[in-house]
Amino acid sequence: MKLTKRRRDTRPEMDMTPMIDIVFLLIIFFMTVTQVSKLNKEQVELPKLKGSEDQKPAVLTINVTEDEEIIISGRSLSVDDLIAMLNRELRRVGDNPRMLSVVIRADQRGRSGGVSSVVRTLKRLNILKVRIAVEVPQ
């Protein structure tokens, strides 16, 4: 009786298919998140201010254009629409104005009327965590 003397390859094999699937899912996730974050930021020329800190994450970003137009998430809103949206956000955070953080991104070329109306609206609703976005000069 003759036994075969062939060697068996005992190296473990690794299937790369699940890892490639995960990489593609991560790419899709980050592309989607990037699109959403760009949607919240309109093309406005921010005022330049030296010595400011980086922008902290906000619950709501309000853009005020040069023409005093109020834009949130790509939609143009009137002051009444802004009040309705802020009331919805307040309900979402349990009607606690301290839990709502707002960033106002105002175009430096515009007049202050749009920003003033937004700030008055926020004050009327007791939303006090308000920040004005600026650009640090280089």
Image (cartoon, rainbow, N blue to C red):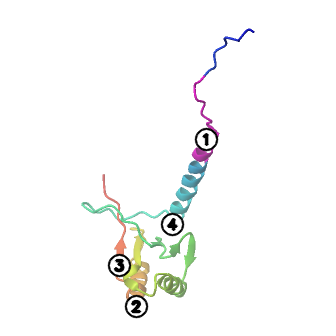
Disc 3 secondary structure class: strand
Q: Nearer the viewer, mark 3 or mark 1?
A: 1
Q: Nearer the viewer, mark 4 or mark 3?
A: 3
Residue type at numbered disc 2? Arg
Residue at the limit of the structure toward the right, as seen here? 1
Task: Identify the mark at residue 20; answer none if there is no mark.
Answer: 1
Task: Identify the mark at residue 40; answer none if there is no mark.
Answer: 4
- Determine if the magenta segment contains residue 23: yes
Q: Nearer the viewer, residue 125 or 96?
A: 96
Task: Identify the mark at residue 129; answer none if there is no mark.
Answer: 3
Residue type at numbered disc 1? Ile
Q: Quadrant of residue 18?
A: top right
Q: Residue at x 26, y 60 (%)?
A: 50
Task: Decide which of tag 3 and tag 1 comes sooner along the chain.
Answer: 1
Residues at discs 3 and 1 in contact (Cβ within 8 Å): no
- Distance between the Cα atoms at labels 3 and 2? 13 Å
- Distance between the Cα atoms at labels 4 and 1? 31 Å
Tell me the quarter of the image containing the N terminus: top right
Q: Nearer the viewer, mark 3 or mark 2?
A: 3
Residue at the limit of the structure toward the front, as seen here? 1
Disc 4 secondary structure class: loop
Residue type at numbered disc 3? Lys
Residue type at numbered disc 4? Asn
